[in-house]
Each structure stands twice: as C-alpha cells, then as structure tokens.
C-alpha cells in the first residue's frame, strides 16, 4: 500500500469508518471518481466544516455548530427546571420528535457498563452535577431516559442514587418501550406515553 497514492489514502480513510470495510470503501471511491468532481469537493468541504465548527455544548454535551451553547440551551422557551438525561444524541432526537418534552437535556454519551470498563468518569456525569449546582439554572427534576437495557437501567439506578443524595427529584421514564429495546426505534406515541408515565426514583 503506497502512502502517497491518493486513491489508496482515501480508501484507507473510508475503510476506518464503522460498517465500511475495504470492499465498500473501494466501491465508494470508484463511485466518487465516476461522479462530478465538484461533488467530491463539496463532501471534503463539509467534512472540514464539521471538524472545525462542531463541538460539544459546554452545558448539555449535545453536539452543536453554535460558537458557544447549543440552541436548546440558549432557548428561553425551554423549561430549565426539568432536565431529561439521555444516553445519546439519537435518543434526544427521538424524544424531541414526540413534542412531549419542553424541558432541557443532558447527554451522557453512553451508559455505564462495568463489563466494558465504562464507569461514571467515562460519561458526562460530572458535567451533569456541575449543572445542578449552577444557581442560575436551578434544576428541580431530572428525568432519566436511558434505554431499558441492563446497562441503561444500571445507569438510571446510579444516577437516582447520586441525584437523590443532593436533593434532586429523580424520575425514570416508564416502560412501554420493550425491555432491551432502543429509544430511537420506539414510535413517537409509545415514547410520549413513557415520558408521561414516568416514575419517581430514589428516596
Ligand atoms: Zn446545550
């Protein structure tokens, strides 16, 4: 493999992406070579743009291209007293699509998974507690909307314990979402009902 051959370099970069092996990477490169060069450059520009501009919101850990906080954190229309904790951006998007939630979010970027060596410090849990201590954004309730999987439940229990200890009301979205299922694949009505029928956690 020549490090200077542009086709091999591009194939190599593409094949590092999830779900794309060497064969698919080769197919994509050949497809690009057959199509408009302007389109290839637009793709390259889009990649550079995302790399340069997109970052994690310092408050909720969502990804945003805004220079500072994400639009959700900046919005005056969202209730800052209710916080919904989700494990991924995809789950946040799924909950937003229900139109059932008007509070704000916190994105953990994963779930606790002792077997995979993922502990509290690997998730955005510290930033969650920093937020709670922020006097300007007094949070009264945290809704834990991690997925109904073993790891998602373990994460919910961990958070319930920690949050109760600092005097924050904690609830967990109700099931209705199949156990072992994924929030992002639940239909909107099921997800809205799960949010509505949330149950209090902790003491
Ligand atoms: Zn934000």
Image: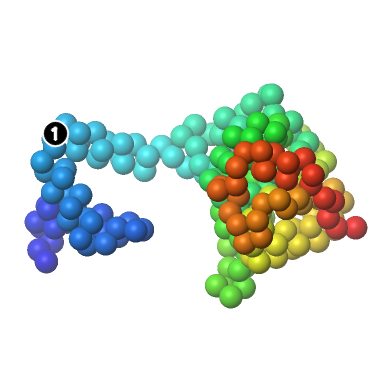
Q: Residue at x 76, y 50 (%)?
A: 174
Q: Can you tell which quarter of the image residue 40 is in? A: top left
**Left-right relation of 88 to 198:** left
Q: Which residue is drawn at 65% across and 56% down?
A: 178
Outermost top residue: 77
> Is residue 135 visible to us here?
no
The quarter in which the C terminus is drawn is: bottom right
State the image coordinates of residue 154 (x, y, percent, origin top left): 70, 65
The reply to whether the residue tagged 1 has its Cβ within 8 angstroms of ligand 1 is no
Q: Which residue is drawn at 66% across and 38% down?
A: 189
**Residue behind mark 1:** 36
State the image coordinates of residue 98 (x, y, percent, origin top left): 64, 35
In front of the other: 72 or 186: 186
Give the secondary structure at mark 1. loop
**Left-right relation of 18 to 93:** left
Outermost right residue: 203
> Is residue 141 visible to us here?
yes
State the image coordinates of residue 194 (x, y, percent, origin top left): 73, 45
**Left-right relation of 152 to 67:** right
């Amino acid at each position: 493999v020549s490090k200077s051959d542009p086709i091999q370099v591009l194939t190599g970069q593409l094949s590092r992406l999830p779900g794309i092996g060497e064969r698919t990477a080769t197919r994509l490169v050949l497809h690009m070579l057959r199509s408009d060069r302007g389109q290839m450059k637009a793709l390259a520009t889009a990649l550079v743009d995302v790399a340069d501009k997109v970052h994690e919101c310092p408050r909720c850990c969502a990804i945003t291209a805004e220079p500072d906080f994400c639009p959700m954190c900046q919005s005056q229309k969202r209730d800052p007293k209710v916080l919904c904790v989700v494990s991924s951006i995809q789950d946040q998007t799924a909950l937003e699509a229900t139109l059932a939630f008007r509070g704000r979010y916190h994105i953990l970027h994963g779930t606790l998974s002792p077997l995979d060596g993922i502990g509290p410090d690997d998730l955005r849990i510290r930033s969650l507690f920093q937020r709670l201590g922020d006097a300007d954004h007094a949070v009264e309730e945290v809704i834990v909307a991690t997925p109904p999987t073993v790891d998602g439940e373990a994460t919910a229990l961990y958070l319930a314990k920690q949050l109760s200890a600092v005097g924050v009301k904690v609830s967990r979205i109700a099931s209705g979402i199949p156990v072992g299922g994924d929030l992002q694949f639940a239909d909107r009505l099921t997800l809205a009902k799960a949010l509505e029928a949330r149950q209090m956690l902790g003491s």
